[in-house]
Image: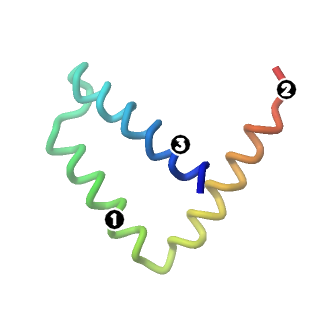
Amino acid sequence: MAVSVSAVVLLAIIVFLLVRKGGLKAGHAVVSALLGFYLASSSVAPSINQLTTKVASLISDVKF
């Protein structure tokens, strides 16, 4: 759960910065958010969740 909350916060910050810098229009951000909600309730949601968890695990294993 902590990984998904962190990912949501990180993605929200990225979208906010893109909207502020003009690289992403507010309408595009709304469409992207709606796509996320629809994907979350679709049959591909478990696959996306597994992929995100594996990527987060891979990143956490990297030693700097």
Q: Could you tell me how far apart the alpha carbons at marks 1 and 2 are, in whole angstroms?
A: 34 Å
In this view, 12 is above or below 46:
above
Sequence-first tag of 1 and 3: 3
SS at mark 1?
helix
Identify residue type, mark 3.
Ser
Residue in view at x 23 percent, y 29 percent = 19
| The C terminus sits in image quarter | top right
SS at mark 2?
loop
Q: Which mark is residue 7?
A: none
Q: Nearer the viewer, mark 2 or mark 3?
A: 3
List x then y, in percent, for residue 58. Answer: 77, 44
Q: Nearer the viewer, mark 1 or mark 3?
A: 3
Residue in view at x 67 percent, y 55 percent = 53
Sequence-first tag of 1 and 2: 1
Q: Which mark is residue 63?
A: 2
In this view, 34 is above or below 25:
below
The residue beneath circle 1 is 37
Q: Could you tell me how far apart the alpha carbons at marks 1 and 3 are, in whole angstroms?
A: 17 Å
Identify residue type, mark 2.
Lys
**Left or right of residue 61: residue 2:** left
**Left or right of residue 18: residue 7:** right
Q: Could you tell me how far apart the alpha carbons at marks 2 and 3 are, in whole angstroms?
A: 20 Å
The residue beneath circle 3 is 6
**Left or right of residue 47: residue 11:** left
Sequence-first tag of 2 and 3: 3
List the single residue furthest toward the bottom: 43
| The N terminus sits in image quarter | bottom right
Q: How many marks?
A: 3
Identify residue type, mark 1.
Phe
